[in-house]
Amino acid sequence: MGRDERGVTPQGEDFSAWYNELVAKAQLVDRGPAKGTMVIRPYGYRLWELLQGELDRRIKDTGHENAYFPLLIPESYLRREAEHVEGFSPELAVVTHAGGKELEEPLIVRPTSETIIGEMMAKWVSSHRDLPLLLNQWANVVRWELRPRMFLRTTEFLWQEGHTAHADEADAMRETMLALDLYTEVARDIAALPVVPGEKTAGERFAGAVRTFTIEGMMRDGKALQAGTSHYMGTNFAKAFDIQYTSEAGRLELCHTTSWGMSTRMIGGVIMTHGDDKGLVLPPRLAPYQVVIVPIGRGGQGEQTLAAARDLAVRLKAVGVRAHVDDRPQLSPGFRFNDWELRGVPVRLELGPRDLESGSVVMVRRLGDEGKQTISLASAAEDMPAVLEAFQAFLLKRATDFRHAHTTTVDTWDSFTEAVTSGWASALHCGEPACENDIKAKSAATPRCVPLDAARETGSCVHCGAPSAYGKRVIFGRSY
Amino acid sequence: MGRDERGVTPQGEDFSAWYNELVAKAQLVDRGPAKGTMVIRPYGYRLWELLQGELDRRIKDTGHENAYFPLLIPESYLRREAEHVEGFSPELAVVTHAGGKELEEPLIVRPTSETIIGEMMAKWVSSHRDLPLLLNQWANVVRWELRPRMFLRTTEFLWQEGHTAHADEADAMRETMLALDLYTEVARDIAALPVVPGEKTAGERFAGAVRTFTIEGMMRDGKALQAGTSHYMGTNFAKAFDIQYTSEAGRLELCHTTSWGMSTRMIGGVIMTHGDDKGLVLPPRLAPYQVVIVPIGRGGQGEQTLAAARDLAVRLKAVGVRAHVDDRPQLSPGFRFNDWELRGVPVRLELGPRDLESGSVVMVRRLGDEGKQTISLASAAEDMPAVLEAFQAFLLKRATDFRHAHTTTVDTWDSFTEAVTSGWASALHCGEPACENDIKAKSAATPRCVPLDAARETGSCVHCGAPSAYGKRVIFGRSY
C-alpha cells in the first residue's frame, strides 16, 4: 500500500470527500449492508468507549442511574404523543413478522425511547417521594436515513438517552440545564470542542418538547454540528402516558419530564473540528493511542531500538499514558510516520540507533507545529502527561480561535449571506417561523441556537426588519 | 407497603414462582410491552454493568478489541450458512418496512452476528499478517421467545459476542478454549458460580458450529443453567462468507473462526444459585451495594446515627467498598432490614444510639449464618474488605458443596431418573442422538456437557447399554 492509497482529498478541495475518505482510511468505520448503517471498527469504537466513559461517570456522579428498556416498541405507543409521532414517522423501521408469524400489532425499532420509558415511569412513580426519577440508557437507535453520512447521519447509531421525571417545571428545567452543562463540559474538556450552548428556536425543537437546548460546534468548513441536545418536555409525555404523583398536599399532579442525548455523532464532530489534510487529529484525552513509538533501524540495531521502545512504552503506561509501539519493521519509517498522522495520534516518538546512543528520542506533535524536538529518553515518560495536556489545551484554543474568526456579527442581509458561506452569522431575528424558512430557502442557513451567554440586545430582524425576538442575537449557520 | 407485599413464595413450595416474584420485587426487572421483552431496572442493570466491567477487562487483556456491527442484517446473509439459518429461523424478528416504504429485501434484527461479522472479516482479512483477528461486541440481540422468563429467556437480551478468525484449526481451538476459560473465571471468581466447563454433545451444538463448549451452573432447584458458550466454527462461516487469507507460502487458505457469548442470562444464574426464601443473595464482587448502613433512632438520636452512618459510608468508600446509607426514617428498622435482605445486600450494618455510645456497630451477613456481630465502629471500614472477601468465598464454597451434594454418579437407569429429579446425573453414554432423545423424552434430562476435567472412563451407556462414547462420563440434568 503506497502513500497514494492512504492520502485523502485536501479539505480545501472537497471537504465532504476529505471526510468520507478519512473515516474509512483511518479505519474508524466501514459501511454496513443495510442502507445507511455503519460498522464501527475497533479504532473508532475505542474513541466511543473513551467518550462514553467520561460522560457515564459524570451522569452517575450527578445522581442518575443507568437502566435498559426494550428495543421494540408497540406502534400504538408512538401515536400517543401527537407531535412526537409526526416527527418520527418518516424515519421508522417496522417489525411486522416475528417468530414465523405476522404480528397483530407492528413493533417499531426504537428511534428514541420517550414513549416506552414514559409507560414505565407511570408504573414506577406514585408519590412525591419517588421524584425526581433520574434515568439514563446507553443504547442503539434506528432512524431510517436517506442521505447517510458516517457518524453524522446513520440509520443506526449509538447514544445515551437521559430520561427524568420531576415534581414541577422548576426542577425539570434545572435538570434540562444540568444535562446541557454535562455535554458542554465533556465536549470542551474531553473532545476539545468549544461548543456554544444555547436554545433552539421553535422550528428546530425536538418533536414533543416544550423547550430544546443544544450544543453547537463549528466544523473546519464553517458549518455547524449539533453535538448534543437536552429537552424540557413539560407535561406532554406525562399526559400521554399518565405519569402522575401524589404531592405532599395529597393532590394528584402530572410530572414534568426531560430527555437528553449525545451520540456517536460526536465522533464526527471531533474529526471535522480538529482534522487536517494529513488525516485525523485526536485530542489526547480521547485518543486510543496518545503516544506512538516508532523504532527505527535494521537487523541488530532494529532489535535494540525495538527493545528500548518497548521499555519506554512500559514506562509511559506506568504514568497513565496510552502508548503503542509500532512493531512493523517491514514498513519504512516514512510510511509509518504518515500512517500515524493519518490516524491522528497526538504525539509520535521516533527512536533510531543514534538517538539511543545519545539517550534521546525525537518527539513530534501531530500538528507538527513545534517541529521535531529532541528530548531525553530517560525523562520522556514522566514528561509526557504535561506534553499531552498542553496539546489538548492547544487544540481547544485553536478550535476556539477558529470559531471566533469564522463568526461574524451581522446587521445587513448582504453581510449575513456572505458570513454563512464560510462560517456563522450572529444576527438579530424576529423569531417568526415564516421568516426562518425564508432565510433557509435563500441562504441554506438555519438558526443554530440562541446562545445562553449572549449579551442582551434588541433591534430589527436581519432579514425582514421586524422587531427582534429573544432579547439577544441568534447564531445562524449551515449545518450537518 | 407491608411485609406481605414484599414476601416471596418459598423456594421449596414453587421455585419458579419464587424466581418470578423475586426478580420483580427486588426491582431487578419489569416486563416490557412486546412479548417476552424485559425492562432492566437500575438495580438489575448495575449488576450487569459490574459483570460487564469484569468480563470486558479480561477480554481486552487477552488481546481482543471491541467493535460494533449493525443491528439489521439482510435476510440473505443468514441463508448463506445452511445450519445456521435453520437453527435461527423460528426465532427471527423481521423488519419489512422502513422509511415509509416496503423494503426490497427484509432485514433481520440480529439474533447473533456471525453472518454480518463474517461478511466484514472477509473484507478486512487478506494476508496471514491480518490474523488472528480478535473482535468482541457488546450488543442487544433479538430471538422471539414464546415461553419467556426474565433474564433466562427473553425476546431481547444483552450480551457480548466474541468473533475471531485464525489461520488454522489449532489457533482457533486455542481461542475457543481461552474464551471458555474467561467465562469460567468470571463465573467462579466474580459471580461465585462453580460452573462446570465442558463440551456439548452433537445434538446440543450451536447452529453452524463444529464444536460447542459451555459452562454449566447448578441452580438451587437442581436444574442446570448454560451460562456461557464458546464455539469452534471450523471453516463453515469462512466458506459461506469467503473469509480467506494468503499464507506465508503464498497460498489462498480459508480462515478458521470462533464465536463465544455471555449474556444477561448470567444474572438469572446468580439469583438461582445464591438466593433464598428471604430474597436475593448477591456475591460481594457483583453487588451494587456491598454494605448497607441502617441508622436507627428517632428525633435527635436519629440525626446523630444518620450522621455517623454517613461518616462510616465515606470511610467505606475510601477503602473501595460500595456502601449505601438507608435514609428512610419513616420506615421501621425491621422493614428496612427485610428490604435489604430481599435485595441481597451482602452485609448490613445497624447503627443505633446505644451502638454509637459504645463506639460499635452491629454487623449481619446476608445469610445470617454468623448471627449478629458487634464490631468496632472505628475499624469497621478497614475491616470490611476482608469481611466481604470471606463472604464471597463462603458463597462459592456453599454453591460448590451444593453442586457436589446434588450430583450423583449413576450406572443404572433407575438411579439416573431419580438423580435428575433433584440434581445432575454423571453417567456413561453411547453418544447416539437417538438415545439422547429417548433419555430426554423419558426423563426431561439432556446431556449438559462432557466435562473437560473428568477422569477417563469407559463402559456401557446408562440408558441403552451400548458401549460408551467420549471416554468419560457425561453430565445430564434438567435445564433452563
Image (tube, coloured by chain):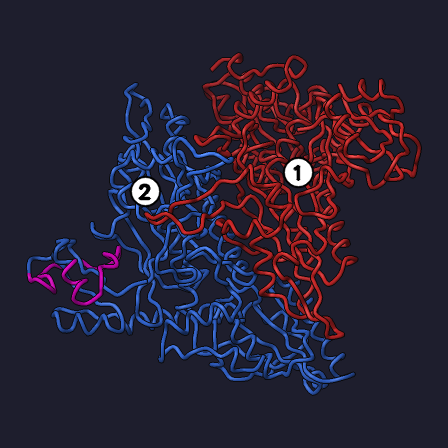
Chain colours: A red, B blue
Q: Please, what secondary structure does the residue beneath circle 2 have?
A: helix
Going by the image, does A223 lie left or right of A137?
A: right
Q: Is residue A242 visible?
A: yes
Residue count near mark 2 (Cα–Cα under 10 Å), binned few <14, some 14–19, many ≥20:
some
Q: Please, what secondary structure does the residue beneath circle 1 have?
A: helix
User: Residue sitting at 64 percent across and 28 percent down?
Assistant: A271
Q: Which residues are magenta?
A: B437-465
User: Residue sitting at 84 percent across and 29 percent down?
Assistant: A426
Q: What x and y, as percent, mark residue B183? A: 39, 53
User: In the rendered image of this protein, does residue B349 appear above or below residue A340?
Assistant: below
Going by the image, does A405 lie left or right of B467?
A: right
Q: Nearer the viewer, residue B20 or B184?
A: B20
At label 2, the amino acid type is Arg
Going by the image, does B171 lie left or right of A168?
A: left
User: In the rendered image of this protein, does residue A245 appear above or below residue A158?
Assistant: below
Q: What x and y, as percent, mark residue B328? A: 67, 76
At label 1, the amino acid type is Arg
Q: Nearer the viewer, residue B293 or A101?
A: A101
Mark 1 vs mark 2, foreground winner is 1
Q: Is residue B423 magenta?
A: no
Q: Quadrant of residue A257?
A: bottom right
> Which numbered circle lies on residue B174?
2
> Which numbered circle lies on residue A285?
1
Q: Is residue A353 visible?
A: no
> Which numbered circle lies on residue B467?
none
Q: Quadrant of residue A344?
A: top right
- Mark 1 → mark 2, Cα distance in angstroms: 35 Å
Q: What x and y, as percent, mark residue A276? A: 66, 21
